Image (spheres, rainbow, N blue to C red):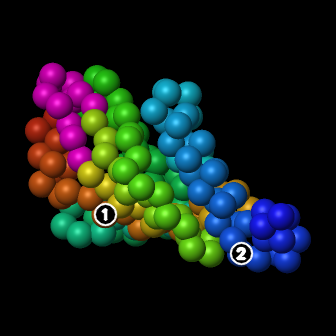
């Protein structure tokens, strides 16, 4: 009965449950190597990497973020990142994902990091993201392993 009442009244709770499910499925696909959260990015989505990372700034759209961060990051890896969600929170249109991710760099060294992503969704698409993670681990990888040209 409660589920029917939530859906019928148009409450934001139904959206929160749906948005969490969208992000959970994207992370499950990422862990399985069959997709990931970046496929949810709207073309005009902004992605902000906070803190003191070499890649810290706001990327104004999907292509800028993918070409300046994701492709160069993946080029540094021999085994891509596998995420493990610690917790998933939702309020309104925002989903917060607290997760660990690990992979292997091309130099054979492990890359391990813990992330908190704040993701705003609209109609099932990511429109805005803010990412927090360990700058020391990221900067070490970014300077130690050059992206393949």
Q: Where is residue 95 in the image (x, y as percent from the top left)?
A: 53, 64
In the picture, measured across the screen, residue 148 lies left or right of residue 13, that is: left
SS assignment at label 1: strand
- Crowd rating for badge 2 (residues with CA inside 10 Å; few <14, some 14–19, many 20+): some
Q: Where is residue 51 in the image (x, y as percent from the top left)?
A: 23, 69
Q: Magenta stretch containing residue 131, yes or no?
A: no
Residue 24 in sight: yes
- Which quadrant does the C terminus fall into? top left
According to the image, label 2 marks what residue?
Answer: 12
- Residue drawn at point x = 37 percent, y = 50 percent: 86
Give the residues drawn in magenta, as a range: 103-113
Q: Position of residue 84 (x, y in %)?
A: 38, 41
Nearest to the observer: residue 1 or residue 116:
1
Nearest to the observer: residue 21 or residue 129:
21
- Residue drawn at point x = 59 percent, y = 57 percent: 20
Nearest to the observer: residue 93 or residue 91:
91
Please tell me whether residue 87 is drawn above or below residue 120 in the rendered image: above
According to the image, label 1 marks what residue?
Answer: 132
């Amino acid at each position: 009965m409660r589920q029917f009442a939530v859906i019928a009244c148009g409450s934001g709770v139904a959206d929160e449950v749906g948005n969490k499910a969208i992000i959970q499925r994207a992370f499950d696909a990422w862990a399985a190597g069959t997709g990931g959260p970046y496929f949810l990015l709207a073309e005009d989505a902004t992605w902000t990497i906070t803190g003191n990372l070499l890649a810290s700034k706001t990327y104004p759209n999907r292509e800028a973020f993918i070409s300046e961060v994701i492709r160069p990051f993946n080029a540094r890896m021999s085994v891509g990142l596998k995420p493990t969600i610690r917790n998933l929170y939702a309020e309104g249109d925002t989903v917060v994902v607290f997760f660990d991710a690990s992979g292997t760099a091309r130099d054979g060294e492990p890359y391990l990091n813990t992330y908190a992503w704040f993701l705003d969704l609209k109609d099932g698409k990511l429109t805005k993201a803010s990412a927090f993670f360990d700058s020391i681990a990221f900067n070490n990888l970014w300077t130690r392993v050059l992206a393949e040209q």
